[in-house]
Image: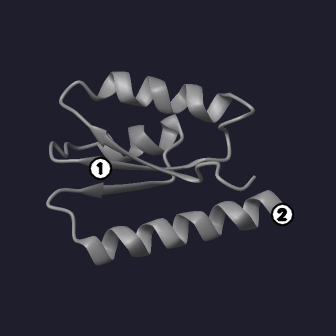
Amino acid sequence: MAGEPILVVEHLPINRKLMLVLTRRMKAAPETRNLCVIAVTSYAMNGDELKARQAGCDGYITKPVDARALLELAARSLARGRQEGQS
């Protein structure tokens, strides 16, 4: 698995439905289902985090992004993914 991506940080644009469809497809495909996906948005609206998680996002963060918070979220999400992959 060396050289394969393990983390995707995706920006949710105003038309976030398209990105969430992409996330669902990545999580449904055998070759990309284990990717850790973190959604980043500057247009946070009520229910967006829930929709992102239902689409398969492992994390959700709003702009302006605090770099330390993003790194901590990525570390937690990756660790959680490794634990789930072992069970």
- Callout 2, which amino acid? Gln
Q: Which mark is residue 86?
A: 2
Left or right: 27 as drawn, with respect to 66: right
- Residue in the picture at 53% in, 71% down: 76
Which picture quadrant has residue 59?
Answer: bottom left
- Callout 1, which amino acid? Val
- Residue in the picture at 60% in, 47% down: 35
Instruction: Relative to 26, say whether 6 is above or below.
Output: below
Q: Which mark is residue 40?
A: 1
Residue 58 position in % (x across, y down): 51, 53
Which picture quadrant has residue 71?
Answer: bottom left
Q: Which mark is residue 16?
A: none
Residue 57 position in % (x across, y down): 48, 46
Instruction: Relative to 61, say whether 29 is above or below.
Output: above
Q: How many marks?
A: 2
Instruction: Relative to 80, say whether 42 is above or below.
Output: above
Left or right: 50 as drawn, with respect to 4: left
Left or right: 7 as drawn, with respect to 51: right
Which picture quadrant has residue 84?
Answer: bottom right
Q: Does the residue at mark 1 contact the one at mark 2 (Cβ under 8 Å)?
A: no
Q: Residues within 10 Å of mark 1 (few under 14, many from 20)?
A: many
Quadrant of the image containing the C terminus: bottom right
- Residue in the picture at 42% in, 75% down: 72
- Element class at badge 2: helix
Residue 53 position in % (x across, y down): 47, 45
Q: Residues within 10 Å of mark 2 (few under 14, many from 20)?
A: few
Q: Earlier in the sequence, mark 1 or mark 2?
A: 1
- Residue in the picture at 51% in, 72% down: 75
The one nearer the camera, 47 or 1, is: 1
Q: CA distance from mark 1 to mark 2?
A: 27 Å
- Element class at badge 1: strand
